[in-house]
Image (cartoon, rainbow, N blue to C red):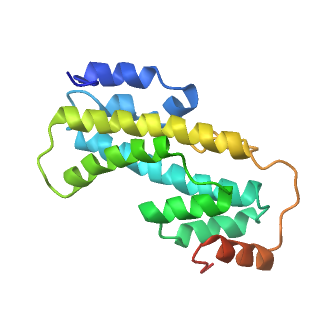
Amino acid sequence: MARIPTYIALNKFYEERAQEVKDYFSHLPNLVGNEFPYDIPLAYVFLRCEQAQNRTLYGGVVKIHRGKREFVSRVMNYQHLTRDGFKDIFKNVFGSPLSKETIEKMEEAEKTRDRVIHGKSVPDNEIREAIADVLEYAELLNNEVSGIAGFKPFGNMKGFKGRADSLDNRTTKWLMKGLGFGVKA
């Protein structure tokens, strides 16, 4: 039997997540159910996930390495992140790779997402499972980043930086190049 056999089970699974994850994916309950096909909530959770991955790297550069917020934000808007690129830059920014558990959780969801996006027929139970995997990934990534840097990318990042002085733009530019970003800002 599947872990998430119905939309009711998916909504229950969502309600069991940490509050910051529920807040981050706040539109998910309205997208799950009989109103929309499951590819809509799947696309939504992956959109929000990619936004959080950008927030993760942005937060790491600003908080850990003291990069200048405005400059880092501009670079992030130009940065093309691939799946492997995110993992590589994460390791550079945070000083350690993502855990195997976190990577595997996302890889399972990505397989389903890829099949849906490329027009393949995917049963609803597999899509519900992928959505649940993304929610679990969000909690895992939040825990990892919080343990290293003290902020949660799938949550409210207000005040995450603190009062530390930032580097100037030129130094931030070289810092980001060294971390593996394609600096074009």
Q: For the view shown, which residue lies furthest in the left direction?
A: 121
Residue 11 sits above or below residue 183 on the image: above
Report the residue at 58% width, 54% height from top: 97
In the rendered image, residue 131, in percent from the top left (x then y), is placed at 34, 37
> From where the camera sits, is residue 155 visible?
no
Quadrant position of the C terminus in the picture: bottom right
Frontmost residue, 116 versus 39: 116
* Left or right: residue 134 compared with residue 34: right
Report the residue at 45% width, 63% height from top: 84
Frontmost residue, 52 versus 29: 52
How many discs appear?
A: 0
Report the residue at 87% width, 50% height from top: 163
Quadrant position of the N terminus in the picture: top left
In the rendered image, residue 36, in percent from the top left (x then y), is placed at 22, 36
> From where the camera sits, is residue 99 visible?
yes
In the rendered image, residue 102, in percent from the top left (x then y), is placed at 48, 43
Residue 99 sits above or below residue 12 on the image: below
* Left or right: residue 151 compared with residue 31: right
Occupied quadrant, residue 13: top left
Residue 182 sits above or below residue 66 on the image: below
In the rendered image, residue 121, in percent from the top left (x then y), is placed at 11, 47
Q: For the view shown, which residue lies furthest in the front direction?
A: 100
Occupied quadrant, residue 170: bottom right
* Left or right: residue 52 compared with residue 116: right
Residue 19 sits above or below residue 159 on the image: above
Report the residue at 53% width, 53% height from top: 53
Frontmost residue, 143 versus 117: 143
Occupied quadrant, residue 5: top left
